[in-house]
Amino acid sequence: MKGFRGLVSGLSRFMSVIAGTTLVFVMLLTVLDVILRYFGYPIMGVYDLVALGGAVIIGFSLPYAAEKRVHVFMEMVQPFFGKAGRQAMDVLTRVIALSISLLVGWNLIKLGTGFRQTGEASLTIQIVFYPVAIGLGICFFLQTLVFAAQIIQGSSEASDG
């Protein structure tokens, strides 16, 4: 179990490094474009690059955020349950999130293969969309592995306790 958890954790950290690097690139590109626009030399295609970069930033940071549990929790109902009830609610929400992530990942992969077949690209600088869509699908599949590891870890902690 520790090997699976370590692999998933390493992959999610790697994806977050890609997200962070993309964020820095998008920020620098935007600042450079604003400066060059002032002098009358805007960078062609910045809008396309920032839009695709935003998708990469959000999608590639999701598995790490899920692993570190830094997303929003709905804790209104938890005080009414005991420890076993809270653990059951945690497993239930992880199963639901895993299912949704699996569906989103599957549909993003289908969308990416469709983009590849049609050659869909951005209008100004013709950046193809399919690598971003497929990459986002992979991120959502990795997020399902994060949720699966959390479910397994939660059930093993419950059986140890």
Image (spheres, helix red, strand yellow):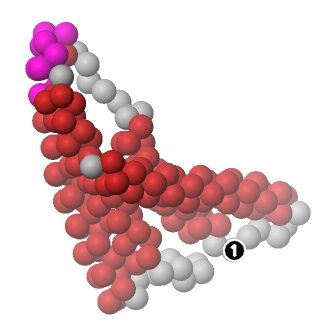
Residue at 42%, 33% (x, y): give it.
Answer: 70
**Is 132 located above or below residue 67 in the figure?**
below
Taking depth in this image into account, of 26 and 11 the one nearest to the observer is 11
Question: Which residue is most to the top?
Answer: 80
Q: Is residue 8 visible?
A: no
Q: Quadrant of residue 138?
A: bottom left
The secondary structure type at the circle numbered 1 is loop
In the picture provided, is 13 more to the left or to the right than 130?
Answer: right
Question: Which residue is most to the right?
Answer: 39
Q: Amino acid at mark 1?
A: Met
The magenta segment: 79-90
Q: Quadrant of residue 120?
A: bottom left
Residue 125 percent location from the top left of the image? 60, 80
Image quarter in which the C terminus is found: top left
> Is 57 colored magenta in this rendering?
no
**Is 28 located above or below residue 117 in the figure?**
above
Residue 80 percent location from the top left of the image? 13, 10
Mark 1 Cα-neighbour bin, 10 Å: few <14, some 14–19, many ≥20: few
Residue at 42%, 42% (x, y): give it.
Answer: 65
In the picture provided, is 124 more to the left or to the right than 12?
Answer: right
Residue 122 percent location from the top left of the image? 50, 77
Residue at 53%, 79% (x, y): give it.
Answer: 127
**Is 77 located above or below residue 70 in the figure?**
above
- State the count of labels: 1
Overall secondary structure of the magenta stretch? helix
Residue 139 percent location from the top left of the image? 37, 60
Taking depth in this image into account, of 37 and 117 the one nearest to the observer is 117
Q: Quadrant of residue 97?
A: top left
Q: Is residue 106 visible?
A: yes
Question: Which residue is most to the front?
Answer: 160
Q: Which residue is mark 1?
A: 44
